[in-house]
Image: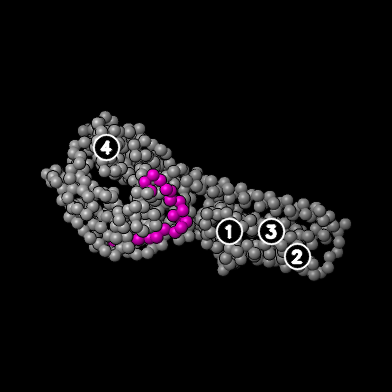
Amino acid sequence: MGKVLPKYQLLFVQVVSYLYILLFVYASFSKLLDFENFQVQLAQSPLLSAYAGTIAPLVISTELFIALLLCLRKTRLTGLYGSLFLMVAFTVYIYLILNYSDFIPCSCGGIIEKLGWTEHLIFNIAFAVLALIAVIILEKEKGTKAYMVLVKSILPSLMSAGIVVVVFLSSEHIIKEENNFIRRFGQHPIRDEKAYDLGVNSYYFAGISGGQIYLGNVTTPLVITSIDTALTTKQAVKIRIDHTGHPFRSIQVRVLQPYFYVYDGNVPVIYRGELGDSLAHTISFEDSYFSQLEVIDSINFVFRAQSSKTKTQVLGKLCLNQNPKVTLNEMLLEKQVDGMFDTDGQLLRDDRTGTFTYIYAYRNEFLVMDRNVDLLRKLHTIDTISRAQIQVRLLADGSHRMDAPPLLVNKKSAVYGQVLFNQSNLIGKFESREMWQQTAIVDMYRTGKQEYLGSFYVQNRGKNAMSRMFATDKHLFVLSGNEIVRYRFAPAVMQYFKTGEAENLYKSRQPF
């Protein structure tokens, strides 16, 4: 049997209903008017990233539907229950953000855009309490027993809270391990600290030693330039080599304390000199042709070359004190089209762990290898291009030629402490095209296991975009136009760096 309620209680229910109608209608229309930005915000949520495409329209439609229920007296009770459950879900979401997420994103906009996350939590709890009181008043009017009111309000509230928790756990798993190309940008993962004008834009990173960044230069290949990590003093040294009669085509320089190395795999030749001395001696000649080279130590190298048997690209090891000197691992680079263009990519050395990474240019895959060029792990980036999208024509002389521009997936990369920094060439879901025109997007991955760690922007320097990058334990160094720019990693990034067998050696030559 229903009861006649005092007017002030009915007035309270009306006021609560109108407040919710105002809240939901304003919030939903704000999201609709800037729907693309709302999806982007959800995609950056550490709880909902993987489901941004589904949750964005679902939240808006739910808010409008509940607001409609609250407008009609016959459905007002149902609307208040819906308001309670939705507000509980929002409250649990904010609680998880504050206590269990990897980072705290920017606060949402709309009617409460000025509130921080803690104030937002208090706001939601207060509104949830108002909805619960209004529900109790209307159920009392209907004559519903108290225990039934508790059952009808508490159990669904717990269910809505549980749904949020499940979505959070599954979203984190999907984003980090099975990502469907949704990037997550943390708050200020790098900070622009200092820039230095190098004068020309033809430099590349050769290595780091003793607090000095070493740079090679493609236009003056036998000059090695050093600049201190504080970016205050630059010095150039002309390299002398003990034999200059080779038909050089592409001389490169690498630094790994206490030596610098000069090489040209087209000849093929490798020189080695001591840092502090400009003279480099031949240590390898005609041992192997190669297109890329990374240093293991003073007599061991990892390289990429073309197999004389298969005519495809392979990775191998050159050991100067063994016979045979060259060993190839022809199973590492997997042929998809022609075995040459489709396996193109970048060979990288992790100075902290002594491992090597090869990231493909035209597919979402990278390989992690030990110093013997044995495969440790095959991992993937978050984009969806698993097969190289290239068109290749076989010529009469047996060579291959590109018939059309390929789809470049990964541009330039760096690796440090089992974290791969990869400049992606592809826009992800729910991303601003305007930001892509103004910045370079760098994605971070573990090389120890399949896990995406997040992304950050590297702002263009005027009209110049980032061309190369180099990572250390505290800084990201970037070449952009004529400048070298130093960014400092946030603690949230540095926490991912892994120690390894090369750590003590690295620290001994890094007085940061």
The residue depicted at 70 percent of the width and 53 percent of the height is 157
Q: Which residue is mark 1?
A: 98
Task: Decide whether residue 488 is among the magenta residues.
Answer: yes
Q: CA distance from mark 4 to mark 3?
A: 68 Å
Task: Decide whether residue 296 is among the magenta residues.
Answer: no
Q: Nearer the viewer, mark 1 or mark 4?
A: 4
The mark that comes first in sequence, 1 or 4, is 1
Which quadrant is the C terminus positioned in?
A: bottom left
The mark that comes first in sequence, 2 or 3, is 2
Q: Which residue is mark 4?
A: 318
- At label 1, which amino acid type do we have? Leu
- At label 4, which amino acid type do we have? Leu
- At label 2, which amino acid type do we have? Val
| Position above or below: 316 against 90 | above
Q: Nearer the viewer, mark 1 or mark 3?
A: 1
Secondary structure, mark 4, is strand
- Residue 196, how many percent across, how many down? 29, 64
Q: Which residue is mark 3?
A: 83
Pick the front one: 386 or 422: 422
Give the class, few, some or many, for how many residues have Cα within 10 Å of label 2's Cα (few <14, many ≥20).
many
The mark that comes first in sequence, 1 or 3, is 3
Q: CA distance from mark 1 to mark 3?
A: 23 Å
Q: Which residues are magenta?
A: 480-503
Callout 4–callout 2 Cβ contact below 8 Å: no
User: In this image, 283 relative to 101: left or right?
Assistant: left
Which quadrant is the N terminus positioned in?
A: bottom right
| Position above or below: 446 against 5 | above
- At label 3, which amino acid type do we have? Ser
Q: CA distance from mark 1 to mark 4?
A: 51 Å
Q: Which residue is mark 2?
A: 13
